[in-house]
Each structure stands twice: as structure tokens, then as C-alpha cells.
């Protein structure tokens, strides 16, 4: 049985970010590291976007930047100047290649294309069984989500951000490559929170993604028929589909950190690193991975890593409202993005606002709805939930 200092069960975004930053820190060259994943990470299986002024770590693999964002609902179209920030797009295959190329140069890091089947923790080590062998380690980072644990509990609301996207090329010059459609709620809501997301690469190329915040997935044909309708609405008559992507991201404030032990740390979606109220992953994982690499240099007990902040409670409030009234998402987001200072919303979603700025955001929201939701949560915390 081969032993490592660290094993990563799952080599997705958060794991690869963390290992990359461990390498760049220069503090872990004496530690042996194993990455295990059944996916070889050779294809473009998703697209990540985030708003930021500049990110020196990942700027080399950003494929497109937008200075302007659009927000739409059935009655209005709002243009948002993101300055000094930009909306950045990274294709997962570029990220994988970039990180794995750096990892391949390190003698102390190994990537094995194997499926993790079982993890067992002992007093002095952890064992990881795959489909072909067993490894052991001092500490384990787990990014493999156990959906059963989240979906069978009832204390914390769970929604899913699920989507199908088409990369298309058109014969006509339809798109404005300087504007990203952040959310278009003009699509029929059908009792859910539904919107279209459009990221133009050029005047004739774009990613169109039909996205829902809801409890359940749809049939593939329903996502794709909505994309076809939207393409028709844009006046596009001739186009070809270059690539497709699909995904489902859990939106929940479930306390994943309760499963952390001294030697085992849950990261990524399995550790609550996804922004619960939006499903945004890249920016949150970037921050959390930096915190984790710094943590590893001074502390050893993984139970000390996670800290709850005020934004966790804000996310819980919004999710609770959308869980009970899934059809009003468009109303809430329109209140945020069609009122003055929409740039503040992005700062809020990045969890970088002061308490005074928080109040400005909250004051934009439907007041009666949020006051009722707030009192409902307080009641639950006082009588039912023990954090």
C-alpha cells in the first residue's frame, strides 16, 4: 500500500486549484501528493465565469472578457457597466491543461485516473480504495459530493442550478461581442426561476445556456427546445451547434463542514465552496483554495478550517424564499439589477461588502417577502436548528 502525505479524492476545480497553489507557494515540495479521479480531464466539460478587475493567477487562460453586462426581464433591458471589473470566461479544458501541465513537472505529485470507491479513517491515517488498488495518506481532501446526504435532509433548503448550453456559430452577424447577457428573464418562467445566459465570443459565435434554479431537472428536450425558441427570437435562421455542455450545481447552505475531521477535509461543492445563492463556483473556489494553502502552512486540524460568516445567512434567507416560492426569482433579481448601483450587487455576490452596503442590497429586495422570510428563519434557528 503506497502512502502519501496528502490525497485528493476527486480532481475537479477546487482540488486542482489547491494543488496548483501548493506548488506555486513553494512550501510543499517535500510533501507527496496524489490526485485520484475517474475522469482524465481531457475535454471541455463546463465553462466558468467570474467578474474581477484582474486575476494574475488565471489571466493567461481567460478566453474572453466583457466590459458590459446585460440584464433583461419581460419589460426592460438594462446595460451594466462593470468597470473597473470585467466579466471573465474560462473553458474547463484550458484550466485542466494549464494546471495539469504544471503538476506534471513536479516529482512529488502523482495523478491517477482511478475511481474512488471507499474512504476509511483511522487514528493515524486514512485509506482510500479505488477500482484497482488501495492507498493511504496522512490527510485527505474530498471533493466527491454525496448527493444522498443533502437531498434526504429537510432542515436546509436545496435547489439545483441546472442547465444545458449550446455553443453556436451563425451565418448572420447577430451578437455584440462586447456585451454578456448575464440574465434574461424574458423567457417563460413556468412556475420556476428560469433565464437565458448568453456569452458572445464574436458577432457570429456565442454560448447560449438555458438555466433554472429549481427543485428538479427537466427532460433534455425541454432545455433544448427553449434554446431553439430563444435563437428564433434573436432572428437567427442559420446556425450550427459546435459544442454542448450541461450541468447541475447544488444550491444549499447545508453544513458540509460538519463532516470534516482532523484528517479529512471536504472541499469544492462537497465542502460548501459553491456560492449557495447563485451556484457560482470559480471565484469562491479561488478564494477558498488560497485560504486552504495558507492554513496548511500553520495548522493541521481540518476541523478548524471552516468559518461561518454573514453571507452564509444571507444565502440561506434567499434560498429559503426561493425554495418556498420558486416562481418569484425573476422578481427578486429584477429588483436588484434594475435599481441604482447594480455594480454593488456583484461586490455583494463576491462577499466583499460592508454591513452598510449589505443593507443597501437588502433594501432593494421585496421588503414584505424578505421580512417574512427573516422571521421564519429566526424561528427555525431558535427552535429547530443547532449549528
Image (cartoon, helix red, strand yellow):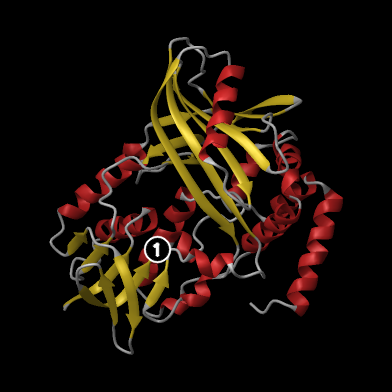
Residue at horizontal 47 percent and vertical 46 percent from the top: 247
Q: In this view, does 331 lie to the left or right of 110?
A: right
Residue at horizontal 80 percent and vertical 65 percent from the top: 376
How many marks do you count on the picture? 1
Residue 299 in sight from this viewpoint: no
Residue 371 in sight from this viewpoint: yes
Residue 3 percent across, percent down from the top left = 19, 77
Q: Which residue lies furthest to the right in this view?
A: 368
Near-viewer residue (93 or 147): 147
Q: In which quarter of the image is the N terminus?
A: bottom left
Residue 263 percent across, percent down from the top left = 36, 79
Q: Is residue 354 left or right of residue 118?
A: right
Q: Is residue 10 left or right of residue 276?
A: left
Residue 109 percent across, percent down from the top left = 19, 62
Near-viewer residue (25 or 380): 380
Residue 379 percent across, percent down from the top left = 80, 72
Query: From what the image shows, is residue 212 above or below residue 79?
Result: below
Query: What SS does tag 1 mark?
Result: loop
Query: From what the image shows, is residue 323 above or below residue 209?
Result: below
**For residue 169, what is the image quadrant?**
top left
Near-viewer residue (178 or 55): 178
Residue at horizontal 16 percent and vertical 65 percent from the top: 108
> What residue would you read off at disc 1?
143
Amino acid at each position: 500500500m503506497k502512502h502519501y502525505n496528502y490525497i485528493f479524492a476527486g480532481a475537479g476545480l477546487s482540488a486542482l486549484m489547491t494543488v496548483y497553489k501548493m506548488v506555486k507557494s513553494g512550501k510543499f515540495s517535500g510533501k507527496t501528493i496524489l490526485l485520484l479521479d475517474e475522469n482524465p480531464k481531457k475535454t471541455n466539460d463546463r465553462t466558468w465565469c467570474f467578474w474581477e478587475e484582474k486575476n494574475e493567477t488565471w489571466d493567461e487562460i481567460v478566453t474572453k472578457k466583457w466590459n458590459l453586462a446585460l440584464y433583461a426581464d419581460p419589460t426592460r433591458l438594462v446595460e451594466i457597466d462593470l468597470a473597473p471589473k470585467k466579466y471573465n470566461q474560462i473553458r474547463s479544458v484550458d484550466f485542466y491543461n494549464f494546471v495539469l501541465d504544471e503538476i506534471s513537472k513536479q516529482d512529488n505529485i502523482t495523478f491517477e485516473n482511478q475511481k474512488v470507491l471507499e474512504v476509511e479513517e483511522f487514528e493515524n491515517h486514512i485509506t482510500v480504495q479505488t477500482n484497482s488498488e488501495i492507498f493511504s495518506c496522512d490527510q485527505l481532501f474530498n471533493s466527491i459530493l454525496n448527493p444522498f446526504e443533502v437531498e434526504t435532509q429537510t432542515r436546509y433548503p436545496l435547489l439545483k442550478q441546472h442547465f444545458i448550453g449550446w455553443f453556436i456559430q451563425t451565418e448572420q452577424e447577430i451578437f455584440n461581442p462586447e456585451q454578456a447577457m448575464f440574465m434574461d428573464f424574458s423567457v417563460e418562467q413556468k412556475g420556476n426561476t428560469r433565464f437565458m445566459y448568453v456569452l458572445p465570443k464574436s458577432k457570429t459565435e456565442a454560448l447560449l445556456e438555458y438555466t433554472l434554479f429549481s427543485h428538479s431537472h427537466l427532460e433534455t428536450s425541454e432545455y433544448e427546445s427553449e434554446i431553439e425558441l430563444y435563437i428564433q427570437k434573436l432572428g437567427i435562421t442559420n446556425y450550427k451547434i459546435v459544442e454542448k455542455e450541461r450541468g447541475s450545481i447544488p444550491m444549499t447552505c447545508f453544513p458540509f463542514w460538519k463532516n470534516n475531521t482532523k484528517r479529512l477535509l471536504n472541499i469544492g461543492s462537497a465542502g460548501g465552496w459553491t456560492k449557495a445563492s447563485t451556484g457560482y463556483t470559480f471565484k469562491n473556489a479561488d478564494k477558498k483554495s488560497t485560504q486552504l494553502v495558507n492554513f496548511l502552512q500553520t495548522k493541521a486540524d481540518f476541523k478548524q478550517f471552516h468559518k461561518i460568516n454573514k453571507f452564509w445567512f444571507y444565502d440561506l434567507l434567499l434560498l429559503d424564499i426561493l425554495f418556498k416560492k420558486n416562481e418569484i426569482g425573476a422578481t427578486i433579481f429584477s429588483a436588484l439589477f434594475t435599481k441604482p448601483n447594480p455594480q454593488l450587487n456583484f461586490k455583494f455576490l463576491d462577499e466583499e461588502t460592508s454591513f452598510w452596503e449589505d443593507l443597501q442590497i437588502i433594501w432593494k429586495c421585496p421588503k414584505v417577502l424578505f421580512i417574512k422570510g427573516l422571521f421564519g428563519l429566526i424561528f427555525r434557528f431558535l427552535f429547530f436548528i443547532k449549528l
